[in-house]
Amino acid sequence: MNSHGQPAEPIRVLIVDDDQLVRLALRLVIEAEPDLIVVAEAADGDGALAAVDDHHPDVVLMDVRMPGRDGVSTTRDVLTRPSPPRVLMLTTFDSDDLVLGALRAGALGFVVKDTPPPRLLEAVRTVAQGDPALSPTVAARVIAAATGPHSSAVRDSAREAARRRLASLTEREHAIAQAIADGLDNPSIAARLHIKVSTVKAHTTSLYTKLDVTNRVQIALMVRDAQG
């Protein structure tokens, strides 16, 4: 139910995967739920962009590896659309670099393709609300990829780029960005900084604009890079 007591509109999902059987399995799981609906399917990145334009989904379930345009570059382009959908990546973890790259591109979460249906559905609903959905296993892989043995040149370049972007923030915005990187939600940030939740939300919106990001995961990764 929405705030007016009317039935809430179902969450509109676009499935993007080059494997037809995977798409079918995901559709069956998603459409068994009364609050979710699959509005379209696509087998590649170009098809995904067309489907986003045509169907305006709330959530895109995006395969990382596809022929032609991969899920990372497709995610980046999807998020340039007006009122873009949230993106939840599908992966088999064949490349941690792709996982990290997709998060930097703006994906809000990851699920592995053999995730149990209840957890998959929970991730779709979480991402639809604008919150990150990273299982402990995925989070561990992301942290490992972000802090792994990269060359010092790559690490230094990422650190300097992140520090330049964070330099534009006010002291309060820095504190909120750090709290986001620490994994705190808005009420917890408000309690830490002794401010209102509405103030946290306002500053977070400012962070999105100043840092040119679309979600809290990207903020957290930027803070981590700056400290690297």
Image: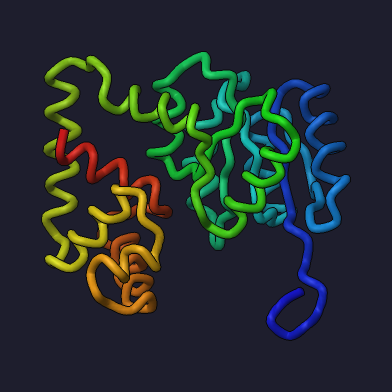
71 w.r.t. 168: above or below: above
Looking at the rendering, in which quadrant would you find the N terminus?
A: bottom right
Question: Residue lying furthest bottom in this view?
Answer: 4
- Nearest to the observer: residue 25 or residue 55: 25
70 w.r.t. 78: above or below: above
Residue 100 appears left or right of 91: left
- Nearest to the observer: residue 91 or residue 67: 91
Instruction: Give the residue displayed 11% in from the left and 55% down from the top.
Output: 167
Residue 133 appears left or right of 5: left
Instruction: Give the residue displayed 42% in from the left and 54% down from the top.
Output: 214
Percent of width and height locating residue 216: 39, 52
195 w.r.t. 53: above or below: below
Percent of width and height locating residue 218: 36, 46
Instruction: Give the residue displayed 34% in from the left and 23% down from the top.
Output: 145
Percent of width and height locating residue 10: 78, 61
Percent of width and height locating residue 170: 14, 67
